[in-house]
Image (spheres, grey):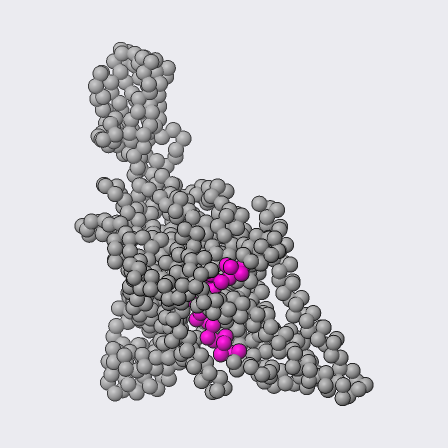
């Protein structure tokens, strides 16, 4: 154990040092290669210009390299692979896409994904907004916010264990140790194995993600709500607007931009959701989603890169509109600077 | 007082809001509380009673064997075996007892039970018993098994933690997780900060395009990268004669996957630093490297800290990247991976699952509560701007 700690510390130090060394020495070498001496003014100014040409690339180089190797190249490669057979050797045209359309499990995953996309971002945004409005008006609001925000720190796997315990079922006449079944039993209902009830189990899994992500929505929306000018609300109060009217006609439109940001961020997250389904059901009982289906095809029976590539492409297509919207928004922002 | 606050001050529903927020807080807290409480309970108690009952004590049925014939003493015509069923346990008391498993609580404590064959048994609530027979107990007889309902006060133990940290590979995984997380938090910050500085303060062709690329890549699903990168890693691994699943491999992967968001967040902050400082440093002859290290880096501390927390939580909590790029063998399994494996192999052993879950959660929670302020600031820098 101790030797492992020592060797782990060792590699950590080496890795961090190597990274710092790159930046330090690459800049040092550039300065040495293109010296700016006091003597020759023309050479100095030429070298200064050259430095200015090279140095930005020393700065963005590592980042650019990583972005291209780990994100840009894979997008292209996955697209190409989706037209090849399971080993990635034989060109098969659109056969993998045809398979996907006809596959029952694939259609089930699409259906479940749409269900997730319809419920989770909406629920998180709604709860986030409501909690933000309510906590902003009470003195212990910040404590309440911390508690709602806390699940953000918990891993999806950890959260799955937490909720699996809530959904735990005991057969026969055993005492229910799962909170949900205990409550159901107290009110005279019949305990169930919640996560294996087809269709409805999707919702029990969604609850986990909603529990995790509502805090995120709350923080963003709370900040946006604070940005609303006081005069607007005062004017509405004077005009005799009631609470609901102020909430729906003044507050919500004012924070519309932030609602969109929260909604899209959670939408992207939902498309990538993998851990929760893996640990709770592993896609059994009709709870499969695209990300898990893709993972399964990647490793199932030696792996089928063509079919899993198709599923990855479908996920990519689903986020493309968001990507375009994001880039446009950023461009608009840059011009405004 | 904020605008929203001042509006609600005159609202008539203040009490309702307090109650509603309290309800929300309870609902949000209870799931985690269940794990924390259960992890501290005795493993036999977890399975027979809900964790919410552990604060008030519990009643459980235990099987005990009475003393053997060699302990018997003659009292007049009768023979008596005396002893205590709660030997060595303090704070517990017997509520009822019985001699058949179907009726473990047939007799109240203190009652004298007729067991037939001229045998009687009396168990008091303090656990002391008198087992009597009107003839001598035969030494061939096996000691008699009886059942008792024992009420126990709330009791908690650290045993579960000892078990998982030493026996279930959680301790090893904890170190693996740290080995993955620390460099995968520091390296991307360094790389992203340099890039963010260049994208904010250095003029070069293609800058606008690069920024658009970064923003676009924020949403690329991780899943896209898996297949090509796995192939790439395998090829490089074979080429170098090394295993393809290594720590540097996963550091690079986490660094790259966190990169778009890191550059985006840090650029928003670094671009907002006062122009005068950087330009006057330039006039004084400082190179961009010096400006970055001496001026920008210290000034950007809040943004760096907030991203560091994000990246730390993200890497520590990741399962997918670790499963694909580090593998699932014992020497490399990270905490989330072990926990997932335990869910499969020890699905019913809640004492192991809850204690393991606590171990995986505790570090991010400490980071979270310690540095929450920075985390919120980072979230807001990236998301609300222009929103």
The front one of B283 and B74 is B283
Which residue is rendered at x = 29% and y = 26% of the image? B146
The quadrant in which the N terminus of chain B is found is: bottom left
Q: Is residue B217 one of those drawn in magenta?
A: yes
Asked which quadrant contains residue B277, the reply is bottom right
Please provide percent x and percent y for residue A168. 30, 49
Q: Can you see residue A170?
A: yes
Which residue is rendered at x = 36% and y = 30% of the image? B86
Please provide percent x and percent y for residue B330. 51, 46
Q: Can you see residue B370?
A: no
The quadrant in which the C terminus of chain B is found is: bottom left
The front one of B165 and A238 is B165
Please provide percent x and percent y for residue A139. 37, 70
Which residue is rendered at x = 34% and y = 79% of the image? A256
Residue B304 shown left or right of residue A29 in the figure? left
Q: Which residues are magenta?
A: B210-233
| Total numbered circles | 0
């Amino acid at each position: 154990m101790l030797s492992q700690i020592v060797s782990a510390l060792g590699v950590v130090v080496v890795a961090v040092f190597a990274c710092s060394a790159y930046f330090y020495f690459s800049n040092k070498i550039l300065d040495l290669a293109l010296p700016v001496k006091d003597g020759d003014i023309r050479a100095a100014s030429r070298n200064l210009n050259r430095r200015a040409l090279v140095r930005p690339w020393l700065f963005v180089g590592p980042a650019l390299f990583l972005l291209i190797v780990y994100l840009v190249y894979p997008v292209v490669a996955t697209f190409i692979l989706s037209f090849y057979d399971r080993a990635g050797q034989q060109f098969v045209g659109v056969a993998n896409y045809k398979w996907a359309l006809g596959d029952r499990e694939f259609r089930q995953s699409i259906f479940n994904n749409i269900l997730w996309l319809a419920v989770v971002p909406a629920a998180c945004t709604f709860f986030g907004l409501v909690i933000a409005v309510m906590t902003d008006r009470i003195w212990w609001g910040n404590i309440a916010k911390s508690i709602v925000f806390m699940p953000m720190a918990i891993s999806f796997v950890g959260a799955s264990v937490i909720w699996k315990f809530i959904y735990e079922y005991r057969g026969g006449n055993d005492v229910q140790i799962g909170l949900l079944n205990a409550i159901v039993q107290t009110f005279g209902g019949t305990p169930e194995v919640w996560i294996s009830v087809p269709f409805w189990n999707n919702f029990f899994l969604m609850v986990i993600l909603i529990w995790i992500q509502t805090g995120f929505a709350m923080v963003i929306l709370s900040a946006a709500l604070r940005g609303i000018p006081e005069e607007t609300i005062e004017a509405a109060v004077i005009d005799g607007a009631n609470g609901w009217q102020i909430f729906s006609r003044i507050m919500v439109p004012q924070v519309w931009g932030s609602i969109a940001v929260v909604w899209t961020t959670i939408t992207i997250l939902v498309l990538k959701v993998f851990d929760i389904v893996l640990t709770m059901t592993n896609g059994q009982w009709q709870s499969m989603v695209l990300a898990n289906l893709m993972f399964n095809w990647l490793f199932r029976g030696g792996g089928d890169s063509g079919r899993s590539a198709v599923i990855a492409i479908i996920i990519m297509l689903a986020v493309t509109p968001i990507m375009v919207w994001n880039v446009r928004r950023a461009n608009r922002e840059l011009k405004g600077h | 007082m904020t605008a929203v606050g001042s509006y609600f001050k005159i609202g008539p529903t203040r009490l309702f809001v307090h109650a509603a927020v309290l309800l929300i807080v309870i609902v949000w807290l209870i799931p985690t509380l269940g794990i924390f409480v259960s992890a501290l309970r005795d493993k036999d108690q977890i399975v027979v009673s809900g964790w919410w009952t552990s604060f008030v004590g519990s009643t459980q049925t235990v099987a005990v064997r009475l003393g053997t014939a060699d302990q018997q003493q003659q009292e007049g015509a009768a023979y008596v075996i005396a002893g205590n069923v709660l030997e060595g346990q303090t704070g517990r008391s017997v509520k009822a007892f019985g001699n058949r498993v179907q009726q473990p609580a047939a007799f109240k404590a203190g009652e004298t039970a007729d067991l037939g064959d001229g045998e009687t048994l009396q168990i008091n609530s303090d656990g002391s018993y008198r087992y009597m027979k009107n003839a001598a107990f035969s030494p061939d007889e096996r000691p008699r098994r009886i059942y008792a309902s024992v009420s126990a006060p709330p009791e908690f133990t650290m045993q579960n933690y000892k078990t998982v940290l030493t026996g279930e590979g959680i301790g090893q995984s904890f170190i693996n997780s740290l080995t993955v997380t620390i460099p995968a938090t520091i390296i991307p910050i360094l790389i992203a900060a340099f890039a963010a500085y260049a994208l904010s303060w250095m003029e070069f062709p293609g800058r606008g395009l690069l920024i658009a690329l970064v923003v676009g890549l924020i949403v690329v699903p991780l899943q896209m990268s898996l297949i090509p990168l796995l192939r790439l890693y395998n090829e490089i691994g074979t080429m170098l004669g090394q295993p393809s699943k290594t720590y540097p491999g996963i550091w690079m992967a986490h660094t790259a996957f966190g990169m778009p968001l890191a550059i985006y967040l840090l650029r928003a902050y670094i671009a907002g630093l006062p122009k005068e400082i950087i330009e006057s440093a330039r006039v004084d002859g400082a190179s961009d490297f010096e400006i970055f290290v001496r001026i920008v880096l210290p000034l950007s501390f809040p943004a760096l800290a907030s991203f560091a927390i994000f990246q730390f939580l993200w890497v520590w909590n990741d399962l997918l990247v670790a499963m694909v790029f580090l593998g699932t063998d014992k020497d490399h399994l990270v905490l989330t991976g072990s926990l997932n494996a335990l869910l499969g192999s020890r699905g019913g052993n809640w004492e192991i699952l809850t204690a393991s879950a606590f171990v995986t959660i505790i570090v991010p929670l400490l980071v979270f509560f310690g540095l929450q302020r920075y985390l919120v600031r980072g979230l807001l820098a990236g998301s609300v701007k222009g929103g």
